[in-house]
Image (cartoon, grey):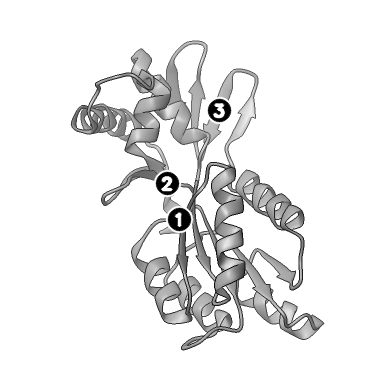
Amino acid sequence: MRLLLVEDERALSQALVNMFEKEKMEVTAVYDGDDGLEYALTNAFDLIILDVLMPKRNGFEVLKVIRENKITTPVIMLTALSSESDKVKGLDLGADDYLAKPFSFKELMARVRALLRRGQSTLAIGNRLTCGNVELDITNSAIRANGKEVQLFVKELGILKFFFERIGFVSGKEEIINRVWGLDSDFTSNNLEVYVSFIRKKLNYVGADFTIDSVRGIGYKITLNNER
């Protein structure tokens, strides 16, 4: 999981970085609103943790621009402003959660996990997964939509299952390769692109209402048509 942490208190920021890294999360830490906004607009993250009172640009301003740019990444706001009106303002601007300082690391971590779980919006029924209008039949290695069905090869099934379990999140190429081919595999990202191309064609054939978008320098992300 890739997190963007925007927090100007250096000691707190480092403590949070240490906590998240112990949970095997990749953290990018910046210390003012301008840098936070730039990273949020130009990189793909699974979650943004955003302080309110910061130099150059406050968290409310950053959040407003993020949402205006159609970035739907979950955002947790951290702030010493604990009044109800401040909380309502953050939520109205598009924050997913709001945590007043001082807070416990355990509580923040619990909220992070809850948001990441919520973002995985795939519906699982038996040995099937659904995303948008597409059903992935794991038992029979096939996808179905609009009355059409197409078979998947074993690795295509593994890749698509991985994507379906991470709706709304960016899947790194190395992460996909490690999951589908194994940690010791010498399989390359160029070969992965070929598999993704085949999967895209099969999704197009059944009329999927989402796309597998490339995220430059990182990997892939499923985007529903109604999110564009």
Relative vertical location of residue 117 with respect to residue 153 in this rendering, above or below: below
Decide if residue 152 is in sight here.
no
Q: Which residue is mark 2?
A: 170
Mark 1 belongs to which amino acid? Phe
Residue 219 image position (x, y, % from top left): 32, 43
Mark 2 belongs to which amino acid? Val
The crowd level at tag 1 (other Cα within 10 Å; few <14, some 14-19, many 20+) is many
Are the two marked residues, 3 and 2, in contact with CB atoms closer than 8 angstroms? no
Relative vertical location of residue 38 with respect to residue 219 in this rendering, above or below: below
Are the two marked residues, 2 and 1, in contact with CB atoms closer than 8 angstroms? yes
Front-lying residue, 55 or 214? 55
Front-lying residue, 82 or 105? 105
Q: Which residue is mark 1?
A: 45
Front-lying residue, 65 or 50? 50
Choose the circle earlier in sequence order: 3 or 2. 3
Residue 30 image position (x, y, % from top left): 45, 70
